Amino acid sequence: MLNISKRDINLDFHQDDYHSLRHVDGLRSGVVLKKILVYLFLAILVIMFIPWTQNIRADGNLTALMPGQRPQTIQAIIDGRLEAWYVQEGDYVKKGDTILHISEIKADYLDPQLMERTQWQVEAKQSTAASYKDKINALENQITALRSSAQLKLTQARNKLTQTRLKVISDSMDLVAAGVNADIAKLQFDRMQKLYDDGLKSLTAYENRKNKLQEANAKLISAENKLLSARNDYLNAQVELNSIRVDYEKDIAKAESDKFTALSSFYDTEASVNKLQNQYSNYSIRNGMYYIRAPQDGYITKAIRTGIGENIKEGTPIVSIMPEDYALAVELYIEPLDLPLIEKGQHVRIQFDGWPAIVFAGWPNTSYGTYGGTVYAIDRFLGDNGMFRVLVVPDVEDHAWPDALRMGSGTNNMMLLKDVPIWYELWRQINGFPPDYYRSNQMDNKDKKKA
C-alpha cells in the first residue's frame, strides 16, 4: 500500500490480523525481478558470442543441369497440314517414335511423282554431261592429230626450204663458173681475132672460137635463169612453210575454241546436275519431314496445336516433351552486390516447395527439412531481370534430394558464407553493411597450389 498521508494507518489496526496483508508484505518481487533481469542479460550476452553463419537468401526453381535435358518443344520444320496424332498427352515415347503426321500444302511439292521426275531430269542432265565429255575427248584427239600432222608438214616444208636454199647455192656456183668460162671464152676470142687479123689463123678457127664464145654466153644466161628460178623456189618454200604453220595454227585454235566451248557447256551441265541432285536430296529429306518424331526418350506433356486439318507454319511449336533422364539443378538469381561473395563449389542449403522444413538461417546445421547443394556455375553476364543466374547441383556429401521433385518447382535457398558472432551480425545488419568477403578453404588451397 502507498503511504501518502502523514497519518500512519498501521496505528488503527494491526496487519498481522489480516492474512492478505501479511502475504503482500512478505513478497520480494523486486529482488526476483532483478535476478530475472541479470540472468536474462547474461543469457543475451552469451548468445551474442554464439557463431552465426552469414548467408544470402534467394528464391529459385528446379531445372535440368544440361540444356538438352530441359523441357522442350517440338517444332514443325516445314509448312504443312496436321493429318493425324499417334500419341496422347502423358504418353512415354522413345527416340524416333512417330508423334504426328502432316501433309504438304505448298504448290511446289504437290506433284505425286515429284521424286521420279526430278530423278529423270538428273539422269538427262548426266547424259548431256557425258555427251559433252565425249565431245571434249574427241576435240582433244583432233587437236593432238592436228599438232602431229602440223609437225610432219612443217618438217616437210622445212626440208623443201633447205633443198631450195641449197639449190640456190648450187646455181650460184654454176653462175660463177659460167661467168668465168664466158670471160675465158671472150679472152680466147679476142686473141683469135687478133691472130686472124694478122693472118696467123684461118677463118674456120676464128669462127669456131666465136661459136665457143656464144656457147659460153648462152651457158652464162642459162645459169642466171636457173639461179633466179632457184631463188623463186626458195621464196615459194618460205611462203609455203608460213602458210602451213598459219593453217594448222588456225585449225588447232578452232579445235581448242570448240573444246573450251564444250568444257563450258560441260561445267554448266555439271552445275545443273549438282543442283538437280541437291533438289532431289531436299525432296527426299522433305518427304521424311511429314512425320514428326521424338528427338529423345521422354514424356509428351502438352499438345500445343491439336486440330486435325489445321495448317501449321514452319517453326510453329506443336508439342512439348519432357526428357526421361535428367539431372536436377536449382536455378536462382542473386543481386550484383552479392556476386563477389559467390564462388564455384560454395555450399548452399535448399528448402523445396512442398517439403516441410524448420529453417534457422544462421544455424544451417540445426535446420530441419533442408538439403545440401553446391554452386556449379555462375553466369558471366547480367540477366534481363538485372541479376546474375547461379546453378546449384546436389551436394554429394549430403543427403540425396527427394525423388519426387519435379522440374519447375520453387525453392528457397541459403548460400552459406562466413561464421561470425551474433553481435557482429546484428551490428552489420543495423549499419546496412554487406556480408564479409568469404573464400572457402578449398579455394584457398587451390590458390596456394597455383602459387
Image (cartoon, rainbow, N blue to C red):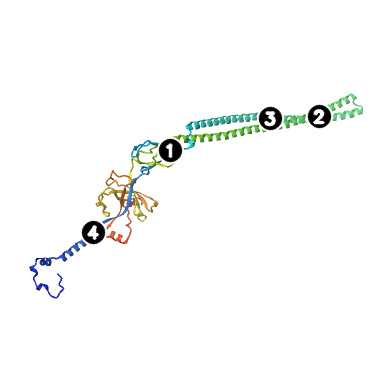
The residue that disc 2 covers is: 221
Label 2 close to label 3 by CB (< 8 Å): no
How far apart in space, not on screen, are marks 4 and 1 (Cα)?
A: 72 Å
Element type where label 3 sits in the image: helix
Precedes in sequence: disc 4 or disc 1: 4
Q: Which mark is residue 157?
A: 3
The residue that disc 1 covers is: 81
The residue that disc 4 covers is: 47
Precedes in sequence: disc 2 or disc 1: 1
- Residue 345 image point, x, y percent: 32, 49
How far apart in space, not on screen, are marks 3 and 4 (Cα)?
A: 124 Å
Precedes in sequence: disc 2 or disc 4: 4
Query: In which quadrant of the rendered view does residue 25 lie?
Result: bottom left
- Residue 236 image point, x, y percent: 73, 31
**Label 1 CA crowd tier, 10 Å (few <14, some 14–19, many 20+):** some
Label 3 close to label 4 by CB (< 8 Å): no
Residue reaching furthest to the left: 17
Label 2 close to label 4 by CB (< 8 Å): no
How far apart in space, not on screen, are marks 3 and 1 (Cα)?
A: 80 Å
Mark 3 or 1: the one toward you: 1
**Label 3 CA crowd tier, 10 Å (few <14, some 14–19, many 20+):** many
- Residue 250 image point, x, y percent: 65, 33
How far apart in space, not on screen, are marks 2 and 3 (Cα)?
A: 30 Å
Mark 3 or 4: the one toward you: 4
Tell me what residue is drawn at x 7 percent, y 68 percent: 17
- Residue 45 image point, x, y percent: 23, 61
Q: Is residue 48 left or right of residue 187?
A: left
How far apart in space, not on screen, are marks 2 and 1 (Cα)?
A: 107 Å
Residue 109: tell me if it is visible: yes
